[in-house]
Structures are given as structure tokens and as C-alpha cells.
Image (spheres, rainbow, N blue to C red):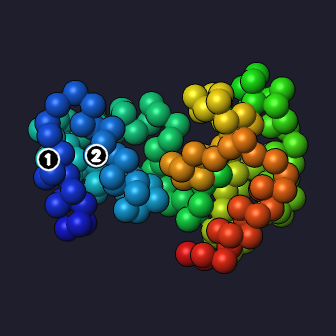
Amino acid sequence: MATLRARLQEIKREPGSTLEALYATQELFSYVPPEAITMIAEELGMPESAVYGVVTFYTMFYLEPQPRYLLRVCRDLSCHLAGAPEIVRAVRQELGTPRGEATADGLFKLEVVSCLGLCDKQPAMLVNLEQRGPMTPERIRALVHELRARGA
């Protein structure tokens, strides 16, 4: 938690700083632990309930530990028409697990999400917060192989 506190002290107290603090927290821990909510509230001078409200409002923040690699595939219209269903199938095939469940090795989890704002990269996805696209089943296989090689 000392590393988190140091990062939080670098964040300016201004509108939007809660999101910055939560991204920093999740980058460190893969989720937002309860003690981090308390620390963020203290450092930013706001109620814990306000921080908790932000965490639970946005779907990109988690209150429970997540796998090392969170794969989010866009399902909105432009990505759907560009082949998102095939991308989801390719990811599921490579991971060997249904969407929403972590792989047995704890490295991956697939989420199918609404618009990522990456219509110029359709079909698009995020690997954690890294933008990827346009994706193909072949690129999915190469990506999963590369990430498995990196391991945890």
C-alpha cells in the first residue's frame, strides 16, 4: 500500500482525479481493494462513499482480484459488422473458457463489452487498457500465444 500512497500523493486534487487514482490502484493490484478506497478518500479529501460510488458506477473497475490479462472485445454495431462475433469465438477457443470466467491458469478473462470508442480499429479490443485492432482470428491466436509466453 505504500506504493499506492506514493502514487496517490502525485495526483492533483481536481475534477477527474478520482478516476486517475482508481486507474493507478487497479494497475497495481488488478482490482480496487477496500483499503485502497479508504486511502483514496483520505488522499483526495472526499468521502469513502463517493469513491465507492465511482468504482461501482464504471464497469472497468473491479472490487475483486482479476486475472493478469483482461481481454475486452467490443460488440457494438460497427465492430459486430466488422467481425466481432468471430473474434469472440476465437478468444473463447484459444482460452478454452466461457466469457466472464478466468482461465484455469489465472492469466486471462474475456469480457464482451459495449463500445470502446475504437471504431477506427474495428473489430477492436482492449488487453487491460492497451488498444488492439483491427483484430482477426489469426491475430487473436498470436496475441494469446504472446501473452501466455509473458506469463504472470
Tags 2 and 1 touching, CB below 8 Å = yes
- Front residue of this view, candidates 147 and 54: 147
In this rendering, would 28 be left or right of 9?
right
Q: In this view, does 6 lie above or below 122?
A: below
Residue placed under numbered mark 1 in the picture: 43
Report helix, strand or loop for mark 1: helix
Q: Tell me what residue is drawn at x 20 percent, y 52 percent.
A: 8
Q: Is residue 83 above or below residue 95?
A: above
Q: Residues within 10 Å of mark 2 (few under 14, many from 20)?
A: many
Report helix, strand or loop for mark 2: helix
Report the disc number at residue 71. none
Estimate the spatial distance between the alpha carbons at disc 2 and disc 1, rounded to whole Å.
10 Å
The answer, for residue 98, to whether it is visible in the render is no
Q: In this view, does 14 lie above or below 135?
A: above
Residue placed under numbered mark 2 in the picture: 21
Q: How many marks?
A: 2
The answer, for residue 50, to whether it is visible in the render is yes
Residue 115 image position (x, y, % from top left):
63, 28
The amino acid marked with disc number 1 is Glu
Q: Tell me what residue is drawn at x 14 percent, y 47 percent.
A: 43
In this rendering, would 87 be left or right of 1?
right
The amino acid marked with disc number 2 is Ala
- Front residue of this view, candidates 18 and 125: 125
